[in-house]
Amino acid sequence: MEIFLGIDLGASALKACLIDDAGRALLSARAPYDTRAPKPGHSEQNPADWRAAMATALADLGAQNSDALDTIAAISFSGGAHIAVLCDGAGTVLRPAIMWNDQRAAAQAADLAAQGTVEALSGNAPNATWTLPQLIWLATHEAEIIAATEKLFFAKDWLAAQLTGAHVSDISEAVGSLMADRNGAWHDTLTAMSGIAPAAFPPLLAIGAQIGMVGDKAAAEFGLPCVPVYQGAIDTSMEWLCGAPLEANSAMVKLASAGVISLATAQDTRFPPVSFYPHILPALGYHAAGMSDCMGAIEFVRRQFTPKLDAQSFEKAAANTAMGAEGAMFYPYLSGARAPFWQADLSAEMHGLTRGHTANHMARAAYEGVGHVLTAIWHDMTGKLGQRPTSLHILGGGGQSDFFCQMLADMLNVEIRRGAETDCAFATALFAAAAHQGMNLHQMAQLAYRPNGIFIPDKNAHRVYASLHESFMARHRAA
């Protein structure tokens, strides 16, 4: 039996998953790291923390089963999009990585949007999430960093390089940087806007191509065998492998640090500022729109408003409270608002509180606030696409909650389907297996998929939520 390792660089933790050649999850591990906010609106992580987290997670897998790492046949990586790691010629990291939820480059993004060139060439609209506006901000405020950059990595590729030494990337990262053309190739005009020398940009490999082998030094440090490492993709591309069947017009909703709704399509029809990325399957793309703070916003409310409740008790409090939370309404914009509002300066708010509200009401309002933003994204995307999928596959840690899955089914008025595995690290291990064995991704996803819940919308609950959603959106219209 061959074993495959998937490593996903998440927004708050690195996750590692081992699967067998039949697509069954065997072991998993998680290692958290800090996000720093040196100024309001800034969000940064230290790549050294990612490397340390990888060592911790792999050691954890080894502790769970002393033979687990020795039997690994292949490895792949995934991670969040838009995260650049700037290095000198020796590969030394020059500064902390700016995260996708950072809002410092809002003015630069607005300037690019007004010019129109970037959208015309890339097919995507600039906002503060994308790498290019962030690099332009650095060229203005930290010009010495841009001048010293001789190697531009993206987060997951930098981590893979710690095993292989390779300086490479893939089409999903190039598109996510806003510096590629509509076909996913580096575009000279767009890369020049960054101020980074052309030689610093990584060659782009096909997703699934072999990057190289785990080097001897890395093998000794991380306890790994010297096995092939295969080029992965950004998390929202890789996560499609958690659903089955894989096909055009399928749809996903991810409930993690960020919340993302993705709609697959065989048509290259774009409606910026909703993002368009290459799918994990050839000849498909997908539209993706997200909110910066999803489960992270719910956790923020728990910690700040109800610190005596643990996460399980907080969810139970929300579930045992009536819809609408007696007028309490949470606006979860801790890092500004992305889709569908696109307001970098929008802030979070717990609105409508009175002396009659309890911790239970605030718990309910937290879940509903996130649900209202996802509802707004759903309406915006399906309206622009002109079609409405009949079901949504659910992903991420929040998808393990039956309560939240049913709430979203009721709010969005769509069937929610959940597989036994909803984490990107599992999908990434599955991808490593498919790449190593030369197996069709359709078949691999179908082989591994095990249903673990279907949530049917309740029509009466939907009518209540639809009315509450109007109240939620009214404050946006009045702003």
Image (cartoon, helix red, strand yellow):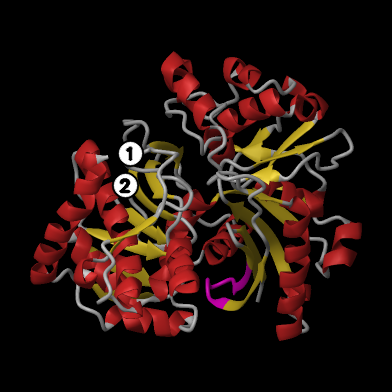
The residue indicated by pointer 1 is 266
> Amino acid type of disc 1?
Ala
Picture residue at 33% right of the left edge, 51% below the top: 247
Residue 128 visible in this rendered orientation of the protein: yes
> Amino acid type of disc 2?
Ala
Residue 72 inside the magenta-drawn segment: no
Picture residue at 56% right of the left edge, 29% below the top: 133
The part of the chain drawn in magenta is 16-25
**Relative to 168, is 403 above or below?**
below
**Relative to 44, is 227 above or below?**
below
At mark 1, the secondary structure is loop
Q: Nearer the viewer, residue 108 or 420?
A: 108
Where is residue 62 shown, x and y percent of the image?
76, 79
Q: Is residue 423 left or right of residue 79?
A: left
Checking the image for residue 153, the label placed there is: none
Where is residue 353 shown, x and y percent of the image?
28, 66
- Of the residues under marks 2 and 1, which one precedes in the sequence? 2
Residue 17 inside the magenta-drawn segment: yes
Name the quarter where the C terminus is drawn: top left
Q: Nearer the viewer, residue 473 or 171?
A: 473
At mark 2, the secondary structure is loop
Q: Is residue 211 left or right of residue 129?
A: right
Where is residue 63 shown, x and y percent of the image?
76, 83
Checking the image for residue 248, the label placed there is: 2
